[in-house]
Image (cartoon, rainbow, N blue to C red):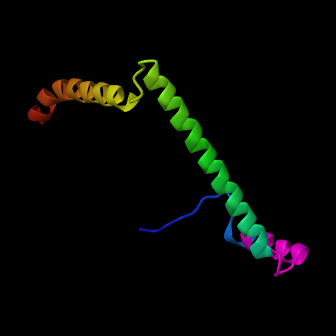
């Protein structure tokens, strides 16, 4: 299995060029500080979105709404699979 990374359709050479430019502009001593700051910012955004999701879920549960949508999707998918099996069952046997 070959692992491929598709990040905004940027190739390896373009990533290397961007890293080179960042090193030239900020210097090698500032790059780790910038990376740490970006990492902390991304973590704060992730935590904030998780908090928002949990608040929405709690509010929906208080209102008596069904928060587990995947159950409904699973039921519908199973129903479609059964319908397809009913239709294709006799066809498969004939061949």
Which quadrant of the rendered structure holds the N terminus?
A: bottom left
Query: In the image, is residue 26 above or below residue 85?
Result: below
Residue 94 left/right relative to 33: left
Which quadrant of the rendered structure holds the C terminus?
A: top left
Residue 13 percent across, percent down from the top left: 72, 72
Residue 8 seen by the camera: no
Residue 75 percent across, percent down from the top left: 28, 26
Q: Residue at x 10, y 32 (%)?
A: 94
Residue 30 left/right relative to 35: right
Outermost front residue: 62
Query: In the image, is residue 69 above or below residue 49?
Result: above
Q: Is residue 89 magenta?
A: no
Residue 57 left/right relative to 31: left
Q: Residue at x 75, y 75 (%)?
A: 32
Query: Dividing the picture into quarters, in which one does residue 77 lie?
Result: top left
Q: Residue at x 63, y 56 (%)?
A: 43
Query: Dividing the picture into quarters, in which one does residue 83 lie?
Result: top left
Residue 16 seen by the camera: yes
Query: In the image, is residue 83 above or below residue 11?
Result: above
Query: Dividing the picture into quarters, in which one does residue 42 lie?
Result: bottom right
Residue 73 percent across, percent down from the top left: 35, 28
Residue 84 left/right relative to 40: left
Outermost right residue: 25
Q: The magenta stretch spans which residues?
A: 15-30
Total labels drawn: 0
Q: Residue at x 40, y 28 (%)?
A: 69
């Amino acid at each position: 299995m070959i692992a491929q990374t598709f990040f905004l359709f940027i190739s390896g050479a373009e990533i290397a060029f961007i890293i080179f430019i960042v090193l030239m502009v900020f210097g090698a001593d500032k790059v780790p500080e910038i990376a740490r700051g970006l990492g902390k910012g991304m973590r704060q955004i992730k935590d904030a979105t998780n908090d928002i999701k949990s608040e929405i879920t709690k509010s929906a549960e208080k209102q008596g709404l069904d928060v587990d949508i995947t159950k409904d999707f699973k039921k519908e998918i199973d129903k479609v699979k059964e319908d397809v099996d009913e239709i294709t069952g006799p066809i498969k046997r004939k061949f």
